[in-house]
Image (tube, helix red, strand yellow):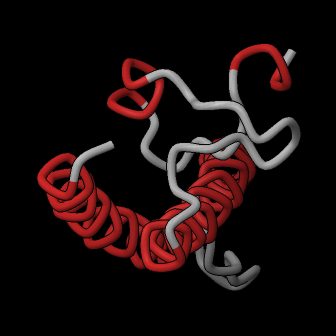
């Protein structure tokens, strides 16, 4: 992978980090506890609880992605970006373009 490729991927990862951090902030607000004294009605409260559990799952996924993006930046810095952490073979450029946080090749992912 060339220095230009790495610079482009670093820019993309940085942009994804910023967006994911915004998503985390929004999801943290949406997963705040629902106060029992809030008079929203029983069915609406059930909908709010359902929505909260969906948002909690989305928050968990966003936090995981955030962690993986930070690790990808670290791999760029130490020169191991684009190599599978399991078998040390090259990760396909198509996979890295789709998921720059990927740290395993398709073979090891399966």
Please give left or right for residue 92 compared with residue 46 in the image: left
Q: Position of residue 14 (x, y in %)?
A: 26, 69
Residue at x-position 20% and y-position 46%: 5
Counting every numbered tag in the picture gives 0
Residue at x-position 71% and y-position 17%: 106
Please give left or right for residue 90 compared with residue 93 in the image: right
Residue 90 to residue 88: above or below: above
Q: Position of residue 91 (x, y in %)?
A: 57, 29
Residue 102 to residue 109: above or below: below
Judging depth in this view, the residue of 36 and 1 nearest the camera is: 1
Judging depth in this view, the residue of 33 and 44 nearest the camera is: 33
Q: Position of residue 44 (x, y in %)?
A: 60, 47
Q: Which corner quadrant holds the C terminus?
A: top right
Q: Which corner quadrant holds the N terminus?
A: top left
Please give left or right for residue 60 compared with residue 99 in the image: right
Residue 81 in view (yes/no): yes
Residue 38 to residue 99: above or below: below
Residue 41 in view (yes/no): no
Please give left or right for residue 78 compared with residue 33 in the image: left
Judging depth in this view, the residue of 72 and 77 nearest the camera is: 77
Residue 43 to residue 77: above or below: above
Residue at x-position 62% and y-position 44%: 83
Residue at x-position 66% and y-position 46%: 103
């Amino acid at each position: 992978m060339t220095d230009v490729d790495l610079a482009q991927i670093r820019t993309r990862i940085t942009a994804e980090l910023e967006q994911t951090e915004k998503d985390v902030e929004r999801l943290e607000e949406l997963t705040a506890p629902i106060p029992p004294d809030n008079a929203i009605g029983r069915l609406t409260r059930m909908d709010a609880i359902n929505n909260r559990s969906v948002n909690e799952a989305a928050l968990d996924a966003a936090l995981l992605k955030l962690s993986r993006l930070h690790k990808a930046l670290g791999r760029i810095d130490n020169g191991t970006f684009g190599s599978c952490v399991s078998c040390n073979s090259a990760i396909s450029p198509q996979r890295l373009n789709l998921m720059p946080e990927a740290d395993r090749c398709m073979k090891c992912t399966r």
